[in-house]
Amino acid sequence: MSDQTHRLAAGGGVDRTRPLAFTFNGRAYGGFGGDTLASALLANGVHLVGRSFKYHRPRGILSAGPEETNALVQLGRGGATDPNHPATTVELWDGLEARSQNCWPGPRFDLGSLAESASPLITAGFYYKTFMWPARLWPLYERIIRHAGGLGRSPTEPDPDTYEHVNAHCDVLVAGGGPAGLAAARAAAGTGARVIVAEQDPAFGGALLNETEETTIAGAPPLEWVERTAGELAAAEEVRLLPRTTVFAYYDHNYLALVERLGDHLSPAEGTGRPRQRLWKVRAKQVVLATGAIERPLVFADNDRPGIMLAGAARAYLNRYGVKPGNRAVVFTGNDDAYRAALDMVAAGATVEAIVDLRPEVSGALPHRALDAGIPVLAGHAIVATHGRHRIQGVSVMALNDDATGVTGAARDLACDVVLMSGGWNPAVHLFSQSRGRLRFDDERAIFVPDTSAQAERSAGAANGTFSLAQCLAEGARAGLAAAQEAGLDGTAEPAPEVDETQESPARTVWVVPTRKTRGARMFVDFQGDVTVKDLRGAVREGYRSVEHVKRYTTAGMGLDQGKTGNVAALAVVAEAVGASIPEIGTTTFRPPYTPVTFGAIAGRDAGDLFDPVRKTPIHRWHADHGAEFEDVGQWQRPWYYPRKGESMHDAVQRECLAARRSVGILDYSTLGKIDIQGRDGAELLNRVYTNAWSKLAIGRARYGLMLGEDGMVMDDGVTSRLGETHYLMTTTTGNAATVLGWLEEWLQTEWPDLKVHLTSVSEQWATVSLCGPNSRRVVAALNPDIALDGEAFPHMSVREGRILGVATRIARVSFTGELGFEVSVPANHGLALWEACMEAGKDYDITPYGTEAMHVLRAEKGFIIVGQETDGSITPGDLGMDWIVSKRKADFIGKRSLARSGVAGGERKHLVGLLTDNANEVLVEGAQLVEDAQSCPPVSRPPVTMVGHVTSSYMSPNMGRSIALAMVKNGRDRIGARLFVAMEGKAIPVSVVRPVFFDPEGGRLDG
Amino acid sequence: MYLIPCPWCGERDQSEFRSGGEAHIARPLEPEHLNDGAWADYLFMRTNPMGLYRERWVHAHGCRRWFNMLRDTVSDRILAVYHMDEAPPEPGDES
């Protein structure tokens, strides 16, 4: 473990009694409790952290917060590695392993850096322009480009961590726990309001964490005030303090999303048994945005070398972490604030070679103190070049001309190992903008500030462009009180505490710092995307005008940091190039998330087995015990087939299909959608939603119905039976039960409130066992129901109620296989008993359980459709050859008028037909396309070819002893007997078009 | 994510609701007397205003009741909810 050469002997918030060991690129280092990875690296003198995305330029640590654009690291190793963490937000823990990204073999010697020598060739838009031709090679190009450019490596193993979701409501949500946020929370809490305070940092205090004790609040060091206020809030009953929690999204109606990092700062051993992160979904009556400000880098020649960092970040490292970022500093600024960094550096024992100030004249308290401290101040100067490859070694400085468009005089070289820069501070308006609030550009200070609110929120402190500490506290308290009052609570204002702070004189904004030569020097605006001033100007020259387009073309602001440091400068460069003002061109749209959020946090517990509810029938256990393979049908798990020992799926399905026609098959049909319809107008409802007539359906009889959408297209089918004078039971397809219930309720509530009908879903109340085959009646009879089963007493398409096995039953004589069939329903609790009794009673007939696959084959042999397989939302009853079920006499039903629309009634429609292959053993692929001639099968010389239809169902039919298929074919009924080709890759399969009923076309088997 | 004041249940999260599109489009009483154009108007054509919009919602994962809502499509503010058989409030009426 190497020494922490740049750690100050005392000071800062780190815990020097808690040493921590970590590795970076395989090398061992030491840090302290309270460090971030970035502060610990800097304590060890490590500035070079990675390489840039495109040019592979050496990059260091720019910031001390989530705005970090350069220092992205890969954490952990192996399959659970985690990429793209800013080193500035990674809290150090003992045993942490981190690696550089985007460089190989390492950041010091990186083969990818060869890209930089080619950089004149790879400006913005390079990929679009270069790799367009030939198009078929794009997949190859893409693979190479992605390998060269990648940001980190994805984990290859499932996420080992757990995550949770919490819903919360509050009167006032305060985003940000700095001075303004704490003052707001305190004022709101004073009214008794329910308050949530979210702070992204582990500690409350915001910018005060980086402050020296020269500033005082109520006569005491700022952190004393922070501690006292946070303590009061923690003790307040209705206040919830959430450190390590980022408000990352501001949605409609004051719905905000927060992510709380519970375990990221812990070693795996410490974190065991607790979730890694928690997603908070908060509905707040009022929101106070106290999200602070983010410092802007200056845009100057080669401004990206390791060791060039933000002045405010240097103050954080010095004052909060007790780390000296360098020994010889040059400060480059256009404002007074950076002078504080210079003074702090001197206080830490470093040398400040010079403060290079863009302002022609410098006055005010802070510059005077710098002069008093013996720091040379070069007013009206600029850095025109930087030197050093893996670490800054020096800068060249020249005098600026009056309007800062050029430099004059001789260049002075200053040696240094760190450059602290400040281009001013941007209010963090991200959440405000997400809430659809409108921004205003403050020309004088060259910043965007919140202007008009769109939701129940207010900004306070630096997020509102208020930078003086005294005003932050006062504004925060006002905002907190006003928010609580608008949330309906009473309270009065307290006087704001006295603040002693040094006042600042006006700043100067120079968006692009001029240099002596323009060739070769790169001025980075977006460090992560390697976007330079030249790229942005080039985009404008190529005709891009909208900032949204320039952004996408150059990728400025599209990195993981979303341009938190670089965006406003990018806007300024584009505005200048377009010849417009910044407010005229506007900002790009701010979208959630504010900082990256793990997929784990978004998924929460809705992962793996809990991703979607699983529905099982009351008979499920039997199926599982008897080796059934299951198929998901919606959320239901249905038996797919029941393989016997050594049987393939094909073998099992063929056996099940034969058994169902030769003797008796048994199917768990409990998943069938069942809607109980009661009331005076039940028949009228059925008349309106089904295509056929229902008025004359007798009690005890059942009828098949086809349900259309108002567009005339088939949406569901099923059998409805009449149980009593005003009592019907509708069945729906398994996957459509909820949709159909919703559909009927919608019509009843919105168009036909006069109909006296009540609907109840009873799908799960009844278990249904379907028996089919010539011996099915004998099996049912063996169970001794009090219902006569003979054909005369109980004809096809009828329903009887009675008792079976001592419980209530409904038995329907219906058939989805063309065989004699009975659907026996009992209350769900008795489903398993019924099934087992059927199996016992059917032993002598070799009763065979069959699954959904055999069911599909059996119905296809009969040409029965499955809604969603033969139909796809564009198929009418006529297309299916089912005009017989569409009433001509009924004046109206849902979808009727649409059947008469041109294009539906006349013209070329697809028809349901059967297909037979020449080769009886060839089973077509479902979804395969049909063409008229073999030459239209791929590979074709002249695409496109005309497709005439597609295969909807295709099986090997054991009862036919050959393959069968159903298809939807253009004018198919006119093609019966004709030849078509199924177009497969490399071959054309000839088929004959036939009627879509293969087995027992006369229907003689229905009566057993 | 809206906070929708269901007329029967009070304020609930949008995830409990389903939108049913534009409100006050009555199904024609005698569709067979409409020409294709008029029928298509009923079937397919909806307004898409920037501003006040009257739309239908159903509390699908709640009381399962349909209701009408007056929403500003620019701000997404919900200005009123009212029963299916009620006339829409006049702009300015709501509050």
Image: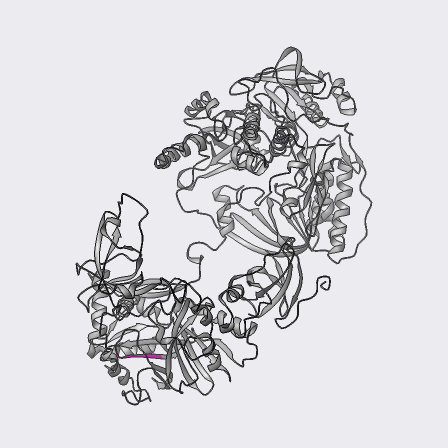
Percent across and percent down for residue A500 are: 79, 33
Percent across and percent down for residue A373 are: 74, 18
Magenta stretch: give its range: A815-824
Res. A496 in view? yes
Percent across and percent down for residue A932 are: 26, 55
Percent across and percent down for residue A532 are: 55, 27
As drawn, A900 above or below A252: below
Q: Is residue A614 left or right of residue A841?
A: right
As drawn, A655 above or below A683: above
**Looking at the rendering, in which quadrant would you find the C terminus of chain A?**
bottom left
As drawn, A626 above or below A466: below
A817 in magenta: yes
Q: Is residue A844 left or right of residue A928?
A: left
Res. A352 in view? no
A490 in magenta: no
Q: Is residue A581 left or right of residue A117?
A: right
In front of the other: A110 or A806: A110
Q: Quadrant of residue B3?
A: bottom right
